[in-house]
Amino acid sequence: MGDEKKIFSDVGEKEVTSAIVSGFAQDFQKYVFSDVIIVGGGPSGLIAGRELAKEGFNVLIIERNNYLGGGFWLGGFLMNKITVRHPGEEVLRELGVPCEEVTPGLFVTDGPHACSKVIASACEAGAKFLQMTVFDDVVLREGGRVAGVVVNWTPVSSLPREITCVDPIALESRVVIDATGHDACVVRKLEERGVLKVPGFGAMWVEKSEDLLVEHTGEVHAGLIVTGMAVATAFGLPRMGPTFGGMLLSGKRAAEVALHTLRDSK
Ligand code: 48F
């Protein structure tokens, strides 16, 4: 011991811990007030985050799970295939995801490949993430404008009641995007507060739902944009099952709407 040639650099526990704490604190400080907070790290939230971060805005994506990607890893019925209807494949190709046309207008790819590329593209564009962090409430400001979110660590909600008095914290932003999928948690919170009425999504009808979902993607309330399956819940649109072109195009549309707001309010 002592004289043998070492493979790894000579740093120990305190340097490792210090790197984690200071790195997290530096990032967190920067995102106490963001340009955009996206709640939900599924396909629609990741694409919206990528587009906005690419434009130089600081984007924070909040995800209640440890992993990102939402329903995009597995496609339908636990079978590892992702389907997209034209023109959804154009987004996959832009990200370098190979896909095959199985019938005119319908493309198939592998979940892990597509999902990992979408996550990587959001990271490479500069989006930042808070995982294991759950949306709890909205921050409302003058005129009822949504101006941020209240969040807590996900594990807090699974602790026994006698030790769960952990207060959440608030993060402010210029725009909030609800990308929480079928649950539409942010929109539902506004309903709970008597601000909106939420019809919930309708029965499955893929030929109608994807077009409607992209068309309805946009601002549902001052300061709050809705994307992905949360749009179907917010507007009572039909669900679409395991096809994802609508999620990718809705993410792009949400980013376009957010860009208008961000540029107008500069
Ligand atoms: O469900 P999800 O993938 O939403 P999406 O982007 O895509 C929907 C498709 O996956 C699929 C479909 C396609 O045809 O119907 O369902 O609209 O991703 C939503 C993400 O939001 C997170 C959740 O864990 C998931 O990763 N999420 C949901 N509620 C919260 C949340 C919350 N309260 N706080 C933080 N994250």
Image (spheres, rainbow, N blue to C red):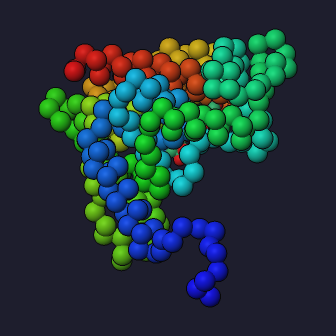
**Which residue lies at the image location 48% right of the left edge and 41% below the top edge?**
40
- Left/right placement of residue 266 relative to residue 211 reads left
Seen from this angle, which residue lies furthest left? Answer: 142
- Left/right placement of residue 216 relative to residue 197 reads right
Visible in this render: residue 186?
no
Seen from this angle, which residue lies furthest bottom? Answer: 1
- Left/right placement of residue 60 relative to residue 227 reads left
Against 51, is 67 above or below? below
Query: Image quarter for residue 260?
Result: top left
Q: Position of residue 87 (x, y in %)?
A: 66, 14
**Which residue lies at the image location 23% right of the left edge and 31% below the top edge?**
145
Q: Position of residue 73 (x, y in %)?
A: 68, 42
Total number of numbered labels? 0
**Which residue lies at the image location 58% right of the left edge and 85% below the top edge?**
2
Report ligand 1 position as a quadrant.
top right
Against 98, is 182 above or below? below
Q: Position of residue 191 (x, y in %)?
A: 35, 37
Visible in this render: residue 112?
yes
Question: In the rendered view of the protein, which quadrant contains the N terminus?
Answer: bottom right
Q: Position of residue 224 (x, y in %)?
A: 34, 29
Question: In the rendered view of the protein, which quadrant contains the C terminus?
Answer: top left
Query: Image quarter for residue 72?
Result: top right
Against 129, is 158 above or below? below
Seen from this angle, which residue lies furthest top? Answer: 104
Seen from this angle, which residue lies furthest right? Answer: 102
**Which residue lies at the image location 47% right of the left edge and 74% below the top edge?**
12
